[in-house]
Amino acid sequence: MILTLMLGFSSIALSQGTQAPAELGKVTWVRDFEQGLARAKKEQKPVFLLFQEVPGCSTCQRYGAEVLSHPLIAEAIESLFVPVAIYNNKGGKDAEVLKFYNEPAWNNPVVRIVDASKKNLAERVSGNYSPLAVLNSMMVALEKSNLVVPTYLALLREEFQSKTLGTKTVTLSMYCFWTGEKELGKLPGVVATEAGFMAGREVVTVEYNPRLLSFENLIESGSKVKCADGVFTADAQEQVKVEKVLGKGKVKEPSTYRPDPESKYYLYQSHYRFLPMTELQAARANSLLAGGKSPEEVLSPRQIELARQIKANPKKNWKPVIGKSVTESWPWPTT
């Protein structure tokens, strides 16, 4: 019973259950466009309009698995929009909507986000089947509709954008890696942190977006909070920058790295260790907990509800999911 209640919010009214077409992912869709428009007008939400081939090709199925089955994307589609699925390989009402938007039949996935009067709120998403493409469109549509972009969605977009454009990593030594993850995990531009050991020292490996946070600023910020007394790097340019910021003798040669089994200590010591999160969410949540604050500000409503159920049922066989994929560890309904 508890499990049923817990999973109920992860895909609202999932009437299709496990029989839902793979191409549609984990989202519960309205299949009538006019009904979707009426709901959008009543609820004052944009329409997330998916044109999809069902049953479809490998691209269509991959889109369902990689984009429409991401728990935070699925939640955003269901809660911030009215999700409408149009099959591009069917006749009847589906064909009428295809004709209205001049969409081709038997095509790869296409997303349009429109208002209740059928007008586009963002550029048509076609040919780019990444989570980032649809997240960009969702945020544009929400902003154009004068609707609030929730923090969890903005962070998700930032994380995917950073990963897509390319991140860098650096390993910093310090007196206490618990403090290191606390301080470094809250820096804008940091995507992920992990505590560990290298050359007999406590270290934190930081993944960051160099477009938002430069190597020098990262080292300087770490030094100010006593979380960068040395930097492990074999890169000649980085070595010069380290000496410029920290002084001579602060460059260390990388050696064997061993992760700490309780990385993200403050998260690990709480019931939130059982809550599926993205890497960026986990880094921020750990920092918030370390500062005595609630991590709810970086979580989605469904994550918050799941965390509350985890806390209320401590004897259940929950498993730690820190460092695991949020999609793979999310408790989707199985029946």
Image: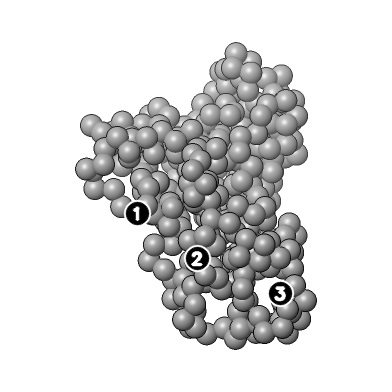
Considering the image in quadrants, where does the C terminus appear? top left
Give the answer, above or below, for where 199 lies relative to 331. below
Quarter occupied by residue 323 = bottom left
In the image, what residue occupies the spot 48% across and 46% down? 289
Q: Mark 2 and 3 residues: CB-CB less than 8 Å, in contact?
A: no
- For badge 3, the amino acid type reads Leu
Quarter occupied by residue 40 = top right
Crowd around label 2: few <14 · some 14–19 · many ≥20 (10 Å): many
Q: Position of residue 20 (x, y in %)?
A: 41, 38
Q: Position of residue 42 (x, y in %)?
A: 60, 13
In the image, what residue occupies the spot 73% across and 57% down? 212
- For badge 2, the amino acid type reads Phe
- For badge 1, the amino acid type reads Pro
Cα distance between the residues tagged 1 and 2: 20 Å
Crowd around label 1: few <14 · some 14–19 · many ≥20 (10 Å): some
Q: Mark 1 and 2 residues: CB-CB less than 8 Å, in contact?
A: no
Considering the image in quadrants, where does the N terminus appear? top left
Q: Nearer the viewer, residue 57 or 110?
A: 110
Residue on which disc 3 sits? 246
Specify whether residue 184 is in view: yes
Give the answer, above or below, for where 297 lies relative to 32. below
Q: In the image, 316: left or right of 230? A: left
Cα distance between the residues tagged 1 and 3: 37 Å
Specify whether residue 92 is in view: no
Element marked by disc 2: helix
Coloring scheme used: one colour
Residue on which disc 2 sits? 177
**Which of the two labelled residues, at mark 1 and mark 2, occupies the earlier sequence position?**
2
Residue 320 marker? 1
